[in-house]
Image: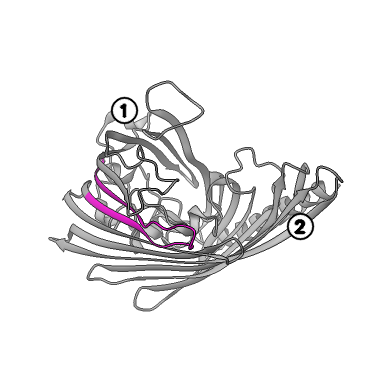
Amino acid sequence: MQRSFTALFALTFIFGLTFIFGLISLIYPAKSEATPNFAREQGLACSTCHTSWPLLNDFGRAFLENGYAVGNVEKIPPRLVAQKDIPVPALRVTLSLFDKSSSQDRTYDTLTEEDKQLKMRAMNRISALFADRVGSFYYFMEFESEAEPNPARDEAGLQIQVPMAHVGWVFSPQFSVRAGFMSPLSPDGRNTVAQKKVQRYGWSASGKEFVPVTTQAISAYGNIGNAFYILSWHGQDGGLEGQDPKFFTGRLAYDLPFNVSIGGFYSSGKKYNEDIGKSEDKLNRYGVDLQWQTEDGFQLNALYAVKSEDETTMNETTGASSQAEATDNNLSVYAQYIIAGAEKPMASIGANYDSYTMNDGDDDWTRGALFLTYFARENVKVQFGWESTLDAPERYTNKESRYTFMVDIGI
């Protein structure tokens, strides 16, 4: 009964907002639309939307948040006749030509000698991205095949998966709805709460679940003046089936002068506990973030987040349950500077800093990364990356490092 009431309340809440903001859309109708099969179909340079892709600039953020359309971008005739009826995907091919891990401690039991071997994945990842907009409706799907070990499958070959897919309806710039297998914060184009990996390196805020990650979700979002908001109802992290969705996430960001944006988020719900067969464990997450971009090529993204979660365990002998609460915090900062020539990126240098606690604050971790990128063309980047564990709990005596040399091609 409680589950039915929660679902009914959530649906009433979302459709109520849809009705209210639908009236607003009659007053503030959506502007001209554009088909977002990326730069190829629009006839635009990659740097129109991106700084060092996949990171977005202000124009790219507006393009994303308005359902792949911006008022002053007009659709041009497609270059391929087939595109009139059949969407031609954008492709991304990643070549990992050098991948080497090392450790100062040769006895470190979680980094084996096999892990330390030089790896060369000349075909590391292939991604096909489909996106389009028809009227006020849009969709986005990504198919990805990556050369990473999959313990569940023994056969050779790159395994295909769909890491993200969603559809959306744009009623007006003030109100849109997006639904799919995605991050509940994915409509936000800032690279703070909705984090995109610059290359192989994954940020601790998403990797350690300080922010909601990919799951089944329904989000309402939009821009009202200089403010941007998201209201989302979703399942727990990684919930492919959206089982017993009891999570609600809210997001508010505000654009200040000098290309500065500040914001915050709050997410609360109950995780499904397989041991007791129901959603019982509370998980609350909240944080504040900042993004700053300058016209001369500097970009700064920062996020401070707190995670508080319960874990219910069952005593197999007595059948009694007990609950423990843990609170951890995270600070993630990414900064990059782009060297441009003739109004397009030529090279960039980026650095990432992550500091977080685990196990109710008992364990402190610090990680860092440095990326040097050269753009052979706007859609072809060559990148050298270094990442390392700078500080770890006392029981970990090593400082693990990893070096990568990759070529990324967008087609």
Label of residue 82 in the image: 1
What's the residue at 26%, 51% (across, down)? 46
366 relative to 130, above or below: below
Sequence-first disc among 2 and 1: 1
* Badge nearest the viewer, 2 or 1: 2
x, y percent for residue 149? 42, 33
* Identity, as a three-letter code, of the amino acid under mark 2: Gln
Colour option used: one colour
Question: Which residues, given as a range, are shown in magenta?
Answer: 383-411
Q: Nearer the viewer, residue 95 or 50?
A: 95
Mark yes or no: residue 225 visible.
no
* Identity, as a three-letter code, of the amino acid under mark 1: Ala
What's the residue at 49%, 30% (across, down)? 151
Mark yes or no: residue 160 visible.
yes
From this viewpoint, which residue is outermost toward the left? Answer: 342
Tell me the quarter of the picture where residue 22 sits. bottom right
x, y percent for residue 300? 35, 69
Q: Is residue 391 magenta?
A: yes
- The residue where tag 2 is placed is 323
SS state under label 1? helix
Mark 1 burial class by Cα count in 10 Å: few <14, some 14-19, many 20+: few
**Residue 10 in the figure: left or right of residue 379:** right
**Residue 171 in the figure: left or right of residue 103:** right
Tell me the quarter of the picture where residue 195 sits. bottom left
Label of residue 398 in the image: none
238 relative to 329, above or below: above
SS state under label 2? strand
x, y percent for residue 236? 63, 49
Mark 2 burial class by Cα count in 10 Å: few <14, some 14-19, many 20+: few
